[in-house]
Image (tube, rainbow, N blue to C red):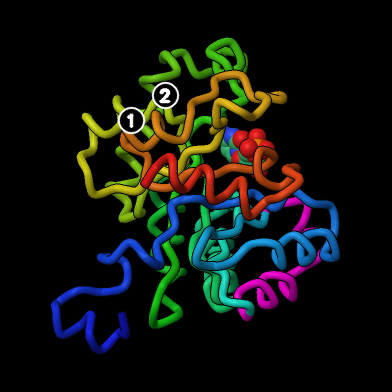
Amino acid sequence: MALSELSKLGLNEDDQGMTDPRIIVALDFSDRQHAVEFSHKVSPEQCRLKVGKELFTSAGPALVEELSGAGFDVFLDLKFHDIPNTVMKAVGAAARLGVWMLNVHALGGIAMMQAAREGVEVVSRRPFLIAVTVLTSMSARDLQQVGIENSLPQVVEHLTRAAIDSGLDGVVCSAQEAPMLRASIGDSALLVTPGIRPEWASAGDQQRIVTPQQAITNGASYLVIGRPITQHEDPAHALELISASIS
Ligand code: C5P
């Protein structure tokens, strides 16, 4: 349906569910060539793409512009964590690149998150800004070792509230934490969940995996999925299977 027809109905593209794919494919490739080759196998109607630290460091902003230019929404996963002024400028630079979503570490503090929120306003259609609370690679013991004595769920919930109170759009979290966070912060915040595995995919190094259907049932807004799609012999087919399972 054309945009003009949608607006007559008081709908936007997202209301139709046609152009708001829930799957964000993690482009965990070491260089531009592999990332671009992969992007040719899938379409912006099927998925969004996540560019992380390795790929961004190797391929640079030009790759983000190239993927955006091809119509993909890009989640720039650089997890900024620095003094407020530096983060504000960095997220501003990312927003000018045209990214769809970006993130910061909630442990940078409320002043830093508020500065980041201000920083994304440099463009008229600002990107979503979300926070990482506690890295899912960290255990309760790891937190104790850096002097954080509260339980892991308490820290995750506390930092999530701090992110939302700072004006951020949501958090990255495990889909296993999603029900607890939905109960705590309500329906409107974005919950972006990695650690997703369809039944037919191997877990790899992920410990606490959740199926795509269960993640959505638990309240996830977007699913970050890497190897089950990028390493599949037919990535578009893998995407179709997963999309069908959550539609
Ligand atoms: O291949 P796989 O589906 O495990 O990829 C998951 C992606 O999500 C990777 O890019 C990984 O770095 C990222 N991620 C994660 N756990 C987090 C945050 C990000 O797996 N807590």
Give percent across and percent down for residue 214: 39, 29
- At a point 72% along the width and 67% down the height, the residue shown is 40
State whether residue 15 is above or below residue 159.
Answer: below
The residue that disc 1 covers is: 218
Give percent across and percent down for residue 179: 30, 27
Image position of 150 (left or right of 44) = left
User: Which residue extends farthest left?
Assistant: 9
Give percent across and percent down for residue 95: 52, 72
Residue situated in front as seen by the camera: 160 or 9: 9
The residue that disc 2 covers is: 176
Image position of 113 (left or right of 96) = left
Hey, what amino acid is under mark 2? Answer: Gln
Hey, what amino acid is under mark 1? Answer: Asn
Question: What residue span does the magenta drawing correspond to?
Answer: 52-69
User: Which residue extends farthest bottom?
Assistant: 4
Marks 2 and 1 in Cβ contact (< 8 Å): yes
Q: Could you tell me if residue 241 is visible in this image?
A: yes
**What SS does tag 2 mark?**
loop
State whether residue 119 is above or below residue 185.
Answer: below
Quadrant of ligand 1: it is top right
